Image (cartoon, rainbow, N blue to C red):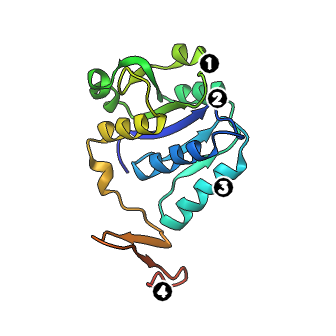
Amino acid sequence: MLKPESYILRIGHRPERDQRMTTHVGLSSRALGASGMYLAADDQKVADSIADVARRFGGTYFCENNVKWKNCISSFKNNSGTVVHLTMYGLRLQDVIADIRAEEKILIVVGAEKVPGDTYELADYNVAVANQPHSEIAALALFLDSLYEGRELELAFPGAELEVLPTAVGKTTLKYDEHRGDIA
């Protein structure tokens, strides 16, 4: 497991508009070393989709649906966690990442629509990947890569049913027999 442990809090998700983006927040964070995502909305379809990928491709990533975002932040801080809010209005990533990297566990707040003003006050760090408008998925990916200094690219995902084999051309996967662990 990478240190610090990282978790995502997705706020502002609108089920009628943001399913694809929120799913990509979860999938990207999973692939880049986060341990799980709290979804501050009721969208079981998104949570199930992320859980299905984690089941098929391995690892222990979770997606908890319908959390109350303020309670999630409060609980995380009460358990010695540090809250990082990704926003284009924050401090420059390169100026604060060393301090954040020294923490034990972090909750990364990723917004969809306009983020409630309280978020800025509740966060320990308001961090900008660039002080320009950009994609929350790109910001999250760059943040996690900076946090883990590229080590996340070497992660193993135990318990996978499927494994993608790197190939120059085409698509190659291995499917493991769930009963024996052998390649089917």
Dot placed on the residue nearer the N-terminal end, 4 or 2 = 2
In the structure shown, which secondary structural element does the residue marked by tag 2 occupy?
helix
- Tell me the SS state at disc 4: loop
Image position, residue 69 (x, y; %): 64, 29
Q: Nearer the viewer, residue 38 or 10?
A: 10
- Decide which of 26, 19 is in the foreground and name it: 19
Picture quadrant of residue 65: top right
Identify the mark nearer the N-term, 3 or 2: 3
Image quarter for residue 11? top right
Identify the residue under disc 4: 184
Where is residue 1? Give x, y as percent.
Answer: 38, 51
Q: Is residue 68 left or right of residue 150?
A: right
Instruction: Give the residue pinned by disc 1.
Output: 116
Q: Are marks 1 and 2 in contact (CB under 8 Å)?
A: yes
Q: Is residue 120 above or below residue 8?
A: above
Local packing at callout 2 (Cα closer than 10 Å; few below 14, some 14-19, many 20+) is some
Disc 3: which residue: 48
Q: Is disc 1 placed on a helix, strand or loop?
A: loop
In the rendered structure, which amino acid carries the disc numbered 1?
Pro
Q: CA distance from mark 3 to mark 1?
A: 26 Å
Amino acid type of the residue that numbered disc 3 sits on in the rendered structure: Asp
Residue 58 higher or lower than 177, as above or below: above
Estimate the x, y position of residue 140 in percent, counting from the top left.
Answer: 43, 37
Give the alpha-carbon distance from disc 1 to disc 4, as whole Å.
49 Å
Q: Which of disc 2 and disc 1 is earlier in sequence? A: 2
Q: Of the numbered discs in the image, which one, if any, rests on residue 69?
A: 2
Mark 1 crowdedness (10 Å alpha carbons): few <14, some 14-19, many ≥20: few
